[in-house]
Amino acid sequence: MVRVCAFPGCFNREKAIRLRPVASSQEESLTFHTLPLHDPERLKLWLLALKRDINSPIENIRAKRCD
């Protein structure tokens, strides 16, 4: 499965990472993090920040954000 960042306007993808040169330091590496699906209050805050529907079923919220 290809990872895509859920943040509006961010086009980072896992596939793009493979095309990039290997990061020479920790600051240059791109990582993806899952949304806090097991913490409803924190998830709601993340969905609001990402401008996503807070009433979406949890099964549909499988997005990740990049760092």
Image: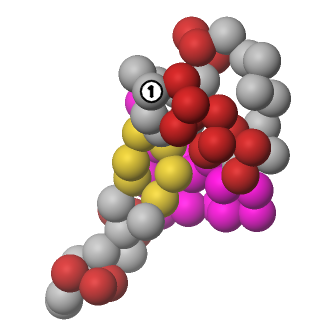
Three-letter amino acid code at the position of disc 1 = Asp
The answer to whether 14 is drawn above or below residue 52 in the figure is below
Whether the magenta-drawn stretch holds residue 53 is answered as no
Which quadrant holds the C terminus? bottom left
On the image, numbered disc 1 is attached to which residue?
Answer: 39
Q: Is residue 13 visible?
A: no
Q: Left or right of 17: which side holds 22? A: left
Point out residue 65 in the picture as x, y percentages from the top left corner.
51, 51
**Residue 62 placement (x, y as % from top left):** 53, 26
How crowded pointer 1 is (Cα within 10 Å; few <14, some 14-19, many 20+) is rated as few
3 sits to left or right of 59: left
- Image: 4 above or below 25: above
Q: Main secondary structure of the magenta part?
A: loop
User: Which quarter of the rendered picture does the N terminus lie within?
Assistant: top left
Q: In x, y percent, where is residue 38? A: 40, 22
Report the span colored magenta.
1-16
Does the stretch in magenta take in 7? yes
SS label for mark 1:
loop
Q: Is residue 44 left or right of residue 66?
A: right
Q: Taking 23 as reference, is 61 left or right?
A: right
Spot occupied by residue 30 in the image (x, y as percentages of width and height)? 36, 68
Q: Extreme front residue here? A: 41
